[in-house]
């Protein structure tokens, strides 16, 4: 995927400077959100045993925040990292999603069932769309899936208050956003996968959780989640906060 994204960045003239600026912003937003405790409500702390690799000593620690979020990341610091896939390329470890472990879950049911069980309703699922692009252009999936989901929901891109778009690579997320004319201030307001990782099987549920809590916190209503998928698929969904 890295090589494909590198080729796409070259073909579409997505500069390293623009990718680094987007990536630095992702880190800075995530750092600010973490310091302000904006993730606390959506993260369930876990007690785990860890072993010191040198002494073998084990102890229990509480994991309650993402480890990958790094303070002090700037465009200037990212400019010092060498390309990962092509010596003359633009994609590197700082402007692509980091390798991390993680898990997320959401519980979806009929409103009547939630009310019967006394469950707090965070939001409503409206619709979803899956659209394919050419496999070699897999990072462009959200570009096609987002408009289709909005069409199914009967709304325009301007009706959406917050977009959670996966940040597999700054190049693909930035390109999709610019092609669709989505204001950057509406995208991943608490940072994205570049800042805290993109664990397989986790991102979709993580996006929904982050989106609904942020819509509620800011008093906003309509949100959209989307991601590219290997082999050229793209998926997007529309949500309404309650």
Image (tube, rainbow, N blue to C red):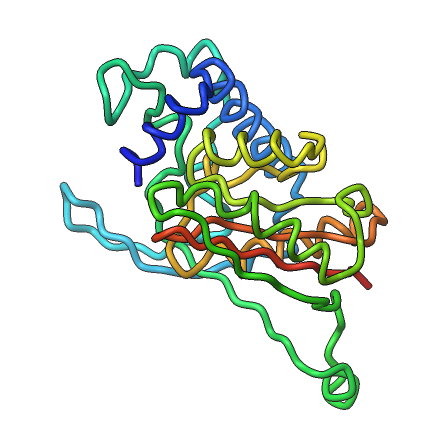
Residue most extreme to the right? 219
In the displayed structure image, the side of residue 164 where residue 161 appears, left or right: right
135 or 55, nearer to the observer:
135
67 or 81, nearer to the observer:
81
Identity of the residue drawn at 22% across and 16% down: 87
Residue most extreme to the front? 134
Q: Quadrant of the N terminus?
A: top left
227 or 97, nearer to the observer:
227
| Vertical order, 147 against 25 (above or below) | below
Task: Count up the numbered dots.
Answer: 0
Identity of the residue drawn at 64% across and 37% down: 33
| Vertical order, 193 against 181 (above or below) | below
Residue 148 in the image: state x and y as whole percent: 64, 55
Residue 173 in the image: state x and y as whole percent: 52, 36
Identity of the residue drawn at 45% across and 29% down: 171
Residue 47: image quadrant is: bottom left
| Vertical order, 20 against 58 (above or below) | above
Residue 85: image quadrant is: top left
In the displayed structure image, the side of residue 83 where residue 108 appears, left or right: right
Residue 49 in the image: state x and y as whole percent: 31, 59
In the displayed structure image, the side of residue 72 where residue 61 appears, left or right: left
| Vertical order, 58 against 187 (above or below) | below
Q: Quadrant of the C terminus?
A: bottom right
Residue 124 in the image: state x and y as whole percent: 74, 68
């Amino acid at each position: 995927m890295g090589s494909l994204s590198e080729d796409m960045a070259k073909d579409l003239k997505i500069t390293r400077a623009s990718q680094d600026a987007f990536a630095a912003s992702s880190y800075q937003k995530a750092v600010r959100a973490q310091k302000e405790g904006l993730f606390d409500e959506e993260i369930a702390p876990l007690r785990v045993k860890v072993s010191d690799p040198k002494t073998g000593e084990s102890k229990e620690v509480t994991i309650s925040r993402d480890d990958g979020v790094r303070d002090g990341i700037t465009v200037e610091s990212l400019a010092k990292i060498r390309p990962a896939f092509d010596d003359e390329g633009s994609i590197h470890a700082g402007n692509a999603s980091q390798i991390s472990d993680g898990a997320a879950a959401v519980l979806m049911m009929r409103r009547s069932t939630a009310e019967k069980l006394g469950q707090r309703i965070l939001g409503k699922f409206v619709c979803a769309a899956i659209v394919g692009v050419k496999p070699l252009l897999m990072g462009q999936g959200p570009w096609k899936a987002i408009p289709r989901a909005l069409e199914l929901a009967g709304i325009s891109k301007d009706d959406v208050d917050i977009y959670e778009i996966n940040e597999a690579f700054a190049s693909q997320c930035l390109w999709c956003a610019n092609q669709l004319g989505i204001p950057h201030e509406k995208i991943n307001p608490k940072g994205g996968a570049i800042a805290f990782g993109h664990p397989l099987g986790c991102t979709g549920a993580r996006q929904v959780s982050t989106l609904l809590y942020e819509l509620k916190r800011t008093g906003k209503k309509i949100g959209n989640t989307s991601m590219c998928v290997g082999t050229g698929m793209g998926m997007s969904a529309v949500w309404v906060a309650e």
